[in-house]
Amino acid sequence: MPRKRTLSAIEKANRSPTEKLRIQQINRRKAERRYRRKIINNPSEHAKDRAASRRANMTEEDKAAAKEKQRAYNATYYLCHRDSILHAAMQKRARAYIDKHGESMFWRSYPHRVVKLRKEDNSN
């Protein structure tokens, strides 16, 4: 016995070509917005995908040159990124403490200290 079609399926089948095109454009815009939102919410993943696709087409010499260029950039602009680097280090240390002692001990007795970039040299 054939399945009965719903009214929405019948309406969809009876659409004119211009109506189909208009709905297709609306759906494309929705998909574009979803994709943009996904990239905005997780930019690092998108950047990793782009970098991976670039690396896949590189030769070994190009990879070594790109790695050296990245090292030079990191050394030059270290001070610009020091806050994020220090924050990541603090997070790593806190996670290790939680793994070892538990979360309740972390909130009760963990030394929540402020990390300084470098020590002052007072030996005049």
Image (cartoon, helix red, strand yellow):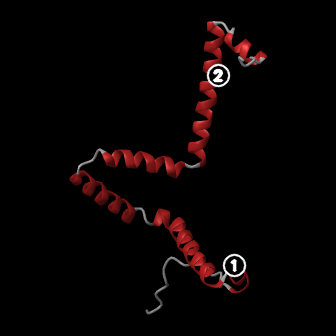
For the N terminus, the quadrant is top right
Residue at (54, 78) in percent of width and height: 116
**Residue positioned 59% across, 25% down in the render:** 28
Residue located beneath label 1 in the image: 103
- Assess whether mark 2 and mark 1 are in contact (beta carbons under 8 angstroms): no
Q: Is residue 6 left or right of residue 112?
A: right
**Residue placed at 63% from the left, 79% from the top?**
98
Q: Position of residue 35 (x, y in %)?
A: 57, 37
Residue 26's place in the image compared with 69, above or below, is: above
* Residue 10: % across, % down: 73, 13
Query: In the rendered image, which quarter is residue 57 located in?
Result: top left
Query: Which secondary structure lies at badge 2?
Result: helix
Tag 1: amino acid: Glu
- Residue 12: image location, x then y, percent: 69, 14
Q: Residue at x 37, y 65 (%)?
A: 75
The residue closer to the viewer here, 112 or 19, is 19
For residue 121, side relative to residue 93 (left or right): left
Left or right: 23, with 6 as reference point:
left
Picture layout, residue 103 above or below residue 123: above
Q: Which residue has dot 2 on it?
A: 26
Q: Is residue 47 above or below residue 75?
A: above
Under circle 1, the secondary element is helix
Q: CA distance from mark 1 to mark 2?
A: 48 Å
